[in-house]
Image: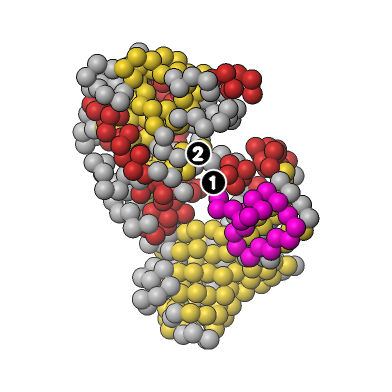
Amino acid sequence: MLAETALRAAGTLFTPPIVVTNQEHRFVVAEQLRNAGISGAQVVLEPVGRNSAPAITAAALLASETDPDTVLWIMAADASISDLAALDAALKPAIAAAREGYFVTFGMTPTAPETGYGYIAQGEALPGLPGAFRLDRFIEKPDAPTAAKLLKSDKNLWNSGMFIFRASLLLAEMERYAPDVLTAVQAAMRTRKTDLDFIRLGAEAFETSPDISIDYAIAEKTDKAAVVPAAIGWSDVGSWSALAEIAIKDANGNAGLGDVVLEDSQNSYVRSDGTLTALLGVKDLVVVTTKDAVLVAHKDETQNVKKIVDRLKKMKRPEADTHNRTYRPWGFYESLIQGDRFQVKRIVVWPGAKLSLQKHFHRAEHWVVVTGCASVTCDSEIRLVHENESIYLPLGSIHRMENPGKIPLTVIEVQSGAYLGEDDIVRFEDTYGRN
């Protein structure tokens, strides 16, 4: 969905994207952009989450360094849009209104009395800007009876969370309505550091920013708000049940992705990342199987997944914070088996990439090359290890793996020792500035 969001601007008037993300997601973001063929993106890393207003302010400040009046199109990466032609048509009046100094949002034509979305009340047409209207007011997420009433008027639209405006306007409105946010983000931009292709915001300054959305900070207060109504097949995919709604379904209303078998089941969404997952005689379920956890929920309860996450955090379970696959600038690794004093991982290294020169105090490692060819440093020796060959790295040895070939290098790593944590590492040299 991140790649789909970034690709929506391809072929339009917009330049490569600015992506604002958490620093823990930097490598998976970079990899998804690379796989989508998106080059030239600027990836801004937040040291902590502070909601959308500070994130958007950082993007506006970065863009304004090149052109203060550049037009920005703000999109969250968790929305689905099925009618791209209609989206392109809606962009034209939105860009025109933004250039005239309006803070433009897109209002989605409702298709149901949805209680999970906020609404927008559309006002009068803007003179000389066909397709754009004044925004009368924002309406909080309604209860079911209120949502049914709102649906009776074509002037009530879903709030998509997409905005278009000039960078200079956003910064002026932030100074007017949310100066504490602007001050904090300006300081974070002044103290930013460049790390590979990433822009790291100054942590100390950014942490002082209020935690506030762009809606509350600016959109609901500005007198320059405008709306462009659109019917673009939009869905704010904020839950598993919402994802199920847009999935392709069989004759029984089921959506199955991955290694899935469904028997005598209806209206269920099933996704597996590898393990065979079978449903028998059930309905209205969401079942998600990954390599480290399984979720089973009624469709009506998927908005409450956060309760499970909060509980896992209180239990100090690693599944609450880490995924089985971990991305690094050189590739990724994933845990296959873990037991008492041993762990087995799969490591994939991109062509031309290499790990840091490092050592461990508590574990030894065996590397078995499955595909590709590895150039391995072990103390003073450098050796080429080909497919179906292995090498032993004793505890305390200074070692490194590099992929000198043209295809991804896949290695099975067997770790053994008293402590196998990722923090048992001393880096002596690193291409990616982590030592």
What kind of residue is marked 2? Ser
Q: Is residue 263 magenta?
A: yes
- Vertically, is 138 above or below 290? above
Within 10 angstroms of label 1, few (less than 14), some, or many (20 or more) residues? Answer: some
Residue closest to the eye, 181 or 340 = 181
Q: Between 295 and 426, which is closer to the camera in this rendering?
A: 295
Q: CA distance from mark 1 to mark 2?
A: 8 Å
Q: Is residue 260 left or right of residue 198?
A: right
- The quarter of the picture where residue 32 lies is bottom left
Pointer 2: what residue?
235
- Quadrant showing the C terminus: bottom left
Evaluate whether residue 188 shows in this view. Answer: no
Element class at badge 1: helix
Q: Residue furthest right?
A: 281
Q: Nearer the viewer, residue 141 or 151?
A: 151
Predominant SS along the magenta part: loop
* Bounds of the magenta segment: 246-269
Q: From the top left corner, tell me how far across and down residue 289 is, in percent.
A: 67, 57
Residue in view at x 38 percent, y 27 percent: 229
Q: Is label 2 in a helix, a strand or a loop? A: strand
Residue 246, label in figure: 1
